[in-house]
Image (cartoon, helix red, strand yellow):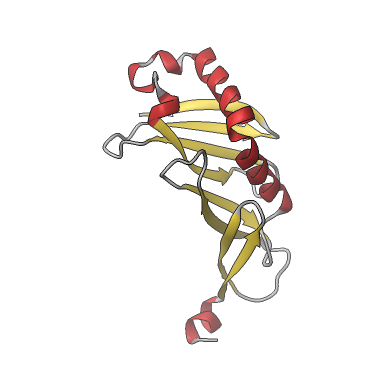
Amino acid sequence: MNIIDSLFGKKKTFNHPIIGILKSQRIKGNNHAKSYTWYGNIFLNNKSLETTIILEGSNSSPFPNHLNFISQLMNNWESEYLPKIENKINEIGINKIGKYSNWKNDFYLSAIYPMNDKNSEFELTLEPLDKQKTDSIGIEIKNNIITKIEKYE
């Protein structure tokens, strides 16, 4: 163990069968009650850009409810999540705004992160494929139900 690991703790790796490799923040000691941040990257829909995922967990792995949500989202992105998101975007009229009218082709899922470390509450961020544009769409999901969609300009 090097001096940095001794002073600040060691980064751990967790390999999930669906999500892949997740890495932790530096973990020092063996405190099972403390929450730690885990992160990784995934690809959805054969998009060329990665989706960053951030999860909370214990000193040994991300919390099971966080792993389950991400796994379910990866397996059902096209068939379940995109149609629900599209319905909600159409319902509130974001699709009628020019720069968001073709959001399914112009945006990608850039990030998934928890809003609550113990519950199944997440925010998804859709960003433009064109990195010169800065507009984005935030989607809040609680217990697999879309509770809020906002555009950020």
For the point 30% across and 40% down, which residue is it?
A: 131
| Quarter assignment of residue 76 | top right
For the point 70% across and 35% down, which residue is it?
A: 143
For the point 57% across and 64% down, which residue is it?
A: 24
Would residue 128 be found to the left or right of residue 62 on screen?
A: left
Residue 86, image x and y in percent? 53, 21
144 is higher (above) or lower (below) than 28: above
148 is higher (above) or lower (below) than 122: above
Looking at the image, which is closer to me, 130 or 10? Answer: 130
109 is higher (above) or lower (below) than 94: below
21 is higher (above) or lower (below) than 103: below
For the point 62% across and 27% down, which residue is it?
A: 147
In the picture, which quadrant includes the N terminus? bottom right
> Which residue occupies the extreme front position in the image?
46
Residue 152, image x and y in percent? 40, 30
Residue 34, image x and y in percent? 68, 63
Residue 111, image x and y in percent? 49, 43
Looking at the image, which is closer to me, 110 or 152? Answer: 110
| Quarter assignment of residue 37 | bottom right
> Which residue occupies the extreme left position in the image?
132
- Number of marks: 0
Would residue 128 be found to the left or right of residue 116 on screen?
A: left
In the picture, which quadrant includes the C terminus? top left
Would residue 50 be found to the left or right of residue 144 on screen?
A: left
